[in-house]
Image (spheres, rainbow, N blue to C red):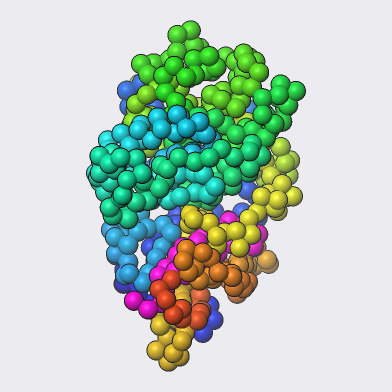
Amino acid sequence: MSKWFLLPCLAGLTVAQTVAPGASQVQPTFRVGTRLVQLDVVVRTDKNVVRGLTKEDFTVQDKGKTQNIAVFSVTDKNAPPAKLTPLPSNVASNRMNNRGETSQSATVILFDRLNTADPADQATARTRILALLRSLKPSDKVAFYSLYDNITVVQEFMDTAEQLSQAATRLSAQAAGGAAGDPLQTALRDALTPTQPLDPTTRVRITSTAFRSIARRLSGVPGRKNLLWLTSSVPLTYGSGTERRSNDEGEVATFARILSEANIALYAVDVRGAGSSFSDAPRDTQVEGGLMPGAGKGSVNQVASQSANTLSGTQGMQVIAEETGGKAYINVNDVSIPLREVLDFAETSYTLGFYVDDKALDGKVHDLSVKIAKKPETNGAKVYARKSYLAASVQSAAQQQQRVTMTELAAEQLDATLIGVMAAALPDPSKPGLHVVQVRVSASDLQFERRGDKWIASFDLGLSIETGGRPGDVNVKTIKLPEFTDDQLKQAMIGGLDINNTVPSPSQPARLRIVVQDKVSGAAGSVRIPIGPK
């Protein structure tokens, strides 16, 4: 593959002749009037993850009806990574880093300061999180985010964990709030700074927005996607009133749905630690040393009835974790224990996909179940996968209401990955004061529709120059692709689509925010690149 500093400026829209790094290499089967539902599945015994399973070893059911598994793939973290060309400094991709590395899974640690309001709890959490980060191994691939009024990104999951571990070690040796050293250490210190409590309605809104942003960040990553949520409560608008039980259940279900639809498994950890949650811990909940005494399988509603407002505490964490195929950890002092288990879960995963005809998309939540064949290696194994999906078409009112605007996408701290995007920028040698910007879009991630014997698709492209960390106005234009024949579509799937642009050259170093959003599905991809004088 040739290096892509900036492809030749060609008028209009072109189909690149080289494979776009980080773009999807799996060409989907296009079907008119259907929706593809995918599940990322982990099969695990009490000792290890089960490897070597095939499509025939799985049975997927939608509302009890067995489905034909049309998509099947295996993601193994230990498999040799694809050797891609490192990216030049003026090029960025939302699916690979500048070293040419792609991710085979993703694990995000989210320290939720917003919903850990008690000062003592925050102090305890800070100590435990620093110990967790110090325990990271150089081979670990984890992101560390912090949440208060917005998401703060300390490190992404394709960065090396060694530097984060070293920053935590240095910060641990300092007094709280003391002077920090390098930028990573400063970012970590700020991400652990105590915060003031906010009202419930605000916390629900911010948490929901953050979960959606994380979902967009991880949606395009293959393999197991894990969110380790370090918190002490689930935010609920109506507080502790028992008369609001149905409202509480609806809000908890919304949190679960956001993550579940993106195939993100939630691992909720009560950062208050041992002794804080015995009064309201749910059944089948992990504690240090095993299950709580007397714990067993039972109805979530039965357990939740033990106290007036259980869903705002550990029961709510458990409900979301179970729905997404994850796990809740209660009364655990050493939060590195959950992280090690989460990373073990990500070793090998299976992606199963089936098509649902539009006639079956009734706008309701459908139960999903995954069963595995009985064989020696699966003896005693448990399947971890999401438990349901919303059976709605991409053009339904329910889905359209969830669509985020281009301005909101541009302002997000996290890059969206459901559409693969690569971009480059260089000063225009023929036109001083302008930068040439080229954006490469992964065609295989767009929603193509059949029109006669041709394929059509369109997407919005937004450009915004960020200065001082603040997004500027977003210049949006709609890209309507030419009608593709079958052969042209296959070529576009391999090469990607290149769109050439120009933007005014900023007088100071800045970042250019590039956002792509499919017109039909609302799927998005985004990336940032440096722009301006060196």
Identify the magenta region: 511-534
Query: How many numbered marks have been drawn onto this rendered protein structure?
Result: 0
Residue sitting at 31 percent across and 70 percent down? 88
Measuring from the top left, give residue 482's x and y in whole percent.
60, 74
Measuring from the top left, give residue 506's x and y in whole percent.
46, 78
Residue sitting at 41 percent across and 62 percent down? 93
Measuring from the top left, give residue 422's x and y in whole percent.
43, 66
Relative to 211, residue 116 above or below:
above
Compared across the picture, whether 107 is left or right of 475 comes to left
- Can you say which quadrant of the picture contains the N terminus? bottom left
Which of the pair 504/429 is nearer the observer? Answer: 504
Give the main secondary structure of the magenta stretch.
Answer: strand
- Can you say which quadrant of the picture contains the C terminus? bottom left
Which of the pair 264/490 is nearer the observer? Answer: 264
Q: Residue 324: within the magenta?
A: no
| Viewer can see residue 486 | yes
Which of the pair 121/273 is nearer the observer? Answer: 121
Compared across the picture, whether 220 is left or right of 183 comes to right
Q: Residue 513: within the magenta?
A: yes
